[in-house]
Image (cartoon, coloured by chain):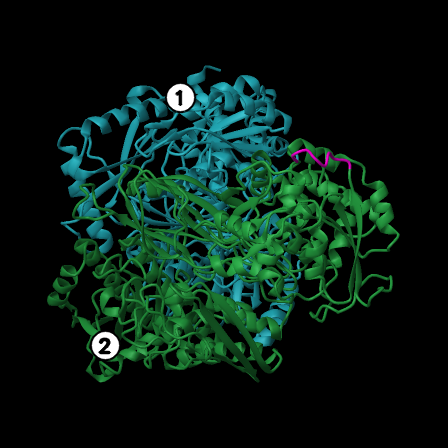
Chain colours: A green, B cyan
Amino acid sequence: MNASRSDPLAQLVMWNRLQAVVDEQARTLMRTAFSPIVRESGDLSAGAFDRDGRMLVQAVTGTPGHVNTMATAVAKFFDHFPRQSMRPGDIYLSNDPWIGSGHLNDFVLVKPCFRGDDLVGFVSCTSHLVDIGGDCMGPDGSDVYDEGLYIPPIRLLAKGRLVETLMLLLKANSRIPDESEGDVHALVACCEVGERRLVQMMNDFAIGALDRLSAHILEASQAATRARIAELPDGTYDNRMMTDGYDVEIELRAALTIRGDQITLDLAGCSGPSRYGINVPLNYATAYAVFGLKCAIAPDIPNNAGALAPFAVTAPAGVIVNAIKPAPVCSRHIVGQLLPDLALGCLHRAIPDRIPAEGAATLWDLPLRNGLVATVPNRPFSIELVHNGGTGARPLQDGLSATAYPSGVLGSLVEVTENVAPVLIRRRELRPDSGGAGRFRGGLGQVIELESCDGAPVQLFGTVDRVKHPARGREQGRAGATGILKLASGRVLNGKGMQEIPGGDRLLVHTPGGGGYGDPFSREPDAVANDVADGLVSAATAERVYGVVLDAELRIDPAGTEIRRRAGRLERPTAGGKPPRTTASAVSASRGVARIGVVVPVSNTNLEPDLDLLRPPGVSLHYMRAGGYDLDAVPDSDQMRTFALASLDAVIDALKATRPDVVLYGCTSATLSHGPAFDRSFCAEIERRAGVPAVTAAGAVVEALADLGVRRIGFCSPYVERLNEEAGEFLNRSGFEVVNLAYVGEALGNYAQGALSPAAVYALGLRADHDAAEAVVLSCTDMRAVEIISELEAAIGKPVVTSNQALIHAAMKRLRLEPGRAGGGRLLEA
Amino acid sequence: MPAEKLTGRLAVDIGGTFTDVVAEHAGGLSSAKVPTTPGAPEQGVIAGTRLALERAGLTSRDFASVVHGTTLATNALIERTGAKTALVTTDGFRDSLEIGYEARYDQYDIYLDKPAPLVPRRLRFTVPERINARGEVLTPLDEPAVSTLAAVLEGNGVEAVAIGFLHSYANLAHEARARELLSPRLPGVAVTLSGEVSPELREYERFSTAAANAYVQPLMGRYLEALAKVLAEEGFDCPLYLMTSAGGMTTLETAVRFPVRLVESGPSGGAMLAKTTARQCGEKAVVSYDMGGTTAKICFIDDYSPVKARNFEVARAARFIKGSGLPLRIPVIEMIEVGAGGGSIASLDALGRLTVGPRSAGADPGPACYGKGGDRATVTDADLLLGRLDPERFAHGRLELRPERAARVVDRDIGEPLGLDPARAAHGIAEIVGENMANAARVHAVEHGRDLETSTLIAFGGAGPLHAARLAEKLGIRRIIVPASPSVGSAVGFLRSPMAYEVVRSRYGTLSRFDHDAVAALYLDLYRDARAVVATSVSAENLREERIALMRYRGQGHEIEIELPPGPISSTTGDALRRRFDRRYSELFGRTLPKVEIETLGWSLTLSGPEPAIAQVAPPVGGETPAPFARRRLFSPAAMDFVEVPAYWRPDLVPGAAIAGAALIVEHQTTTVVPAAFAAGVDEFMNLVLERRDPQVQGSS
């Protein structure tokens, strides 16, 4: 290749070789590193740079937070060490979060490469050290000084000799000094291999400088990236996302501007800094945001300074994604890893059919160490388990279950964990129904259950997100399930901060699901049936959310599916996104909007006044009374079952005469007592008879809870105790968890239930509440609950769902009426 | 004929495209290459065998053994044509097989799909039981639950079952008991235990290996039975041995039980050929280089022993991307596979950069110059344009190569867009493919602390001899050996393989608390297991043992292999291991960490029979230069133009022949390119030996 320095082939071959140089670097680092997160999970980066500190190639192995921060880190060292002061054999080091990878655990090394006396370029690498002192396992520090040893850019090796003082200082500040020393040596070895191979490459090709090669790589990559951006429609596209935060919720906002062949992402408008270590230095925020955009726009263009140049990220100083020193930043990945979803949400508005739904995004890593070291005699341990939720569904593919994105790290295996730490993992399985529904389903999260195997308490450092705010779907796709961290004994844990798992208790981890893509009613029924057969989606969800009715052998019921889906489509907004004010029914509406038919038990005197309170304007309500039960007996399970089994044909036929747009079945306990499967087929039966969508009170309660995105429920009703318990079981079997069940205290007859005062119902609702509950249900269409919804919600700070309110909510959805009923509680006011 | 006088040995290698048969006998080697017959592979075997016997002038009665390697198991995994397989696992862990490492195999690709597990979720069943990391039972096996499961498995029409319980490498009792309960209730269904097929830590790899074994077992069982039958019908009454991925032979019974160990047996045969050649020539540091139609495989051979590994990935969704396949934890010869073969397709990427592979035109339609409908520029097309292939003598003259077709596609796809004439474009293709292989070799060398420049390259496979010299130049290697019959190298390698079986067991410990009694007891177990496999064919006094400890510093994730000192395991073994570990770690990474605890993760034992006796030969010394049969135009990278060079017919060469570069040495299936900087000789074993003549640095030819 001597003849051909200017030969384009020679440039290609050298570019290729440069890639091998950095891959060798990364391999060396993984082989010799101690931090499990480096060697097992690949939390590292390696790259080669030109004389001006511009990244030319990155190793295939590596994670975006490291790679793209390293890309800008090298040139920042020049401010501290002018290039002319650098000597062969020098290696520079820093863990400054605002220079390197965003927190003190990540060390970045930079080595000037010399060919003879000429400085020809640089190699760099980063990796994560387990322990650099401080409170370094989670976001609990109050400033960066709490988070460990802070090392500004310094010279680690001078002319090939290690500066011993520095190593002494580092070791004295680590709980595991020998391993930390080993990790630094691994980084040094990585740099040395890089320089050796880089110079060898230059010798092989007989080139004295990288300038020409650098120009070729950067220009070609930048031009190709810009060409891709130029294909995108110009404009400014917004997105916002609520995220859990530590103590207070955080709003993320972005405005993406595409102008010609340049992209700017402005993060102004994001919430201000947190008191806790979830703040993000801008270099780290930029790394992830640009990574997300690059995946969608130019995934095949090699990642280097040229390919990164057309992307700019801006944010005013002080917002959470542009944290200013000395803000605590230890767990900066929590918010940082949500930024690809934020940026892609903007891009979705520019190119609507290429962008996946939101995913679990933030790693669900579980840093664990043993309880108080000084007082517990067990062998000390600290380990960082790495796990993930589901990724968002893609425009033409389901999301990936329990898979990392945007991070590139690998998950922990059970046997490896149990061999190195005194914990026992009782479960690690996919989490059914956690993938957001859609034409393409979001990836599923997973369930992990873990306990101490020697009865000693274990400290958990919560660093997870999407516990309160789920991954959202796109194009009518539903949100994925939110994540849950709790103890088997019932206590719900915060997603953030140090908490203790008492000996003998068990940690339950439910990682979030990815969002769905497209209307769930348009998912292939076969795909839904397959998911049910594989236990990824429950039969209840298949029917309720996907509108796919399956028989006991999980075969598709085409007629039932057709009816469910036709009924369900009525609730879909039209293409413009704004639901129309008028009914979609072909029948003209008597009072302008719609007619609702209601089946009411003969003795019920509260359903009608409640619905009057909540009746949307322009809607008329038409009642038919149904009997067939002993009015004076105490309504127990048997009576309610009998009631539900009595023929409704005549009642429905009479209602049909009013040409209703939707039919409501106004008794909760009748179908509750038979279980969810009965309730669904009962509802389908009414639909068949009426020829329009129908809703049962029990089904309406389930739907309301699902729409509120809550899972853990406090429950109460005026039912006799056994029926009350059956009602709780109904919700449990419908995918919720009743964490508290309040019983009215005495066996009430039909009329006594209806006579309970609002004050008594309020008191009952308070008793139903529980710390772990996310919402409270007051069940029974003949109980005066609607009048006290607002007061009760104010008192307990959670949404309240009542049977009659849920009925109106479900009817309004099917009529495509916008919410906004004052006094209707969060469900109707939203 | 009395058995002891039989000397003939037959080797059969079934590849995806061709079935190679080599018959070795007193008069030398005879070979045949016939198309593989995928529907009934034994038919191709018989066709090839008859042809080879005819060429050798022998009958089936003249053979003492048949050695067989096949890609059948690999193909079943790639094409998903194996049995309907169920997994029975520990309660709470139904999805270990699917969740794996939670990783995407390509950082930037948001549209990738992961390979589906071999066992779908609906066929993954759990039963209550639990054993901890120390092998202690926490929850006894729920036997009624297992018995109940039998009916469910039968109802689902399951043909094979893998049983994988957590920590079964430490205590096999529950898996074994579950098999006892299931087998009688499931007649004709093969059951694989994860703790038997791969008794090692890491449930994902172990379950994946067990599932793969179960998945291919019915198919391989049927096939091996059919093969044994037709061989018997052909009159072979000698034993049939199977080649394993670790480069040893094993018995038919073991192959039927653990068919997953036969995956990639063909390439391991190639490595054994390189090993034999290394011994013949006294080469202690060897890079084995096997380049065929689709891939190039590179492995290292240290002191006549191929470097082994315990991890392998099969059926990659994205070829050659690590993490996109199914992991298998079995003993293998460690190879890096590069998407670089004769059929690899050259194209320009989004940046207008020339790339070659991993997509391949295969043998059908094949390269454009085959004239069989291929319309993409391939490496073989480039080789033809560069003058490296002999259009007339290629493939026994049965396939006429068409340079004009090669020129057209190379010019259209590469030359014109890049503004290069066809020769330079072809040179570019060859250079890129060479760089891809060289880069892979360099990265691989780092992992093993190898110095490539002092190594010898042993090249074979249909395309290996064409590219060997340029690859050697790129790696700074000065000596190249091309063995005889390079294009059927794997089958020849089968004949050079000893009877061997490796067993390995995970057992965590530290050197500071080295429990030599426990380790000695473990080795008794391992010995018993391995002995059962090799017993039928090798007597005890002829067995060789190799014992390896997998060790690392506490806190690290990658083990290095340390050979145990010879002799019984005693109280001094721990210290000896420490010294050996320190020395090896230092060789690999330049330093030791004296204060850090050293861990032992696992122990392995390989029992092998005697190596085939091989005499060592002296390198060829300047003999006579034979007469070329023709002169050909060869593209010279140094001149960036064509030069005229002599072409020699390899079958005519005799030991001692000396040929100065630049030259071509042509044989039926391939050509050895000898650049100007090299000189070639022929040794007594008919190996071609190429030596670099000048002290120039690489890259400058």
Q: Chain of mark 2?
A: A
Give the residues drawn in magenta, as a range: A628-635
Q: Which residue is mark 2?
A: A116
Helix, strand or loop: magenta stretch: loop
Q: Position of residue A58 (x, y in %)?
A: 39, 68
| Distance of label 2 from label 1 (alpha carbons) | 61 Å
Judging depth in this view, the residue of A802 and B99 nearest the camera is A802
| Dot 1 crowding, Cα within 10 Å, few <14, some 14–19, many 20+ | few
Q: Residue flagged by tag 2: what amino acid is it? A: Gly
Amino acid found under the numbered disc labelled 1: Ser
Q: Which mark is residue B537?
A: 1
Residue B515 appears left or right of B187: left
Check if residue A785 falls in the magenta segment: no
Q: Residue furthest top?
A: B2
Q: Position of residue B181 (x, y in %)?
A: 50, 19
Q: Chain of mark 1?
A: B
Relative depth, front residue between B177 and A641 = A641
Expressed as whole percent of the image width and height from the top left, the position of residue B520 reads 23, 26
- In percent of the image, x 39 and y 41: which residue is there? A489
* A633 within the magenta span: yes
Quarter assignment of residue A449: top left
Q: How many marks?
A: 2
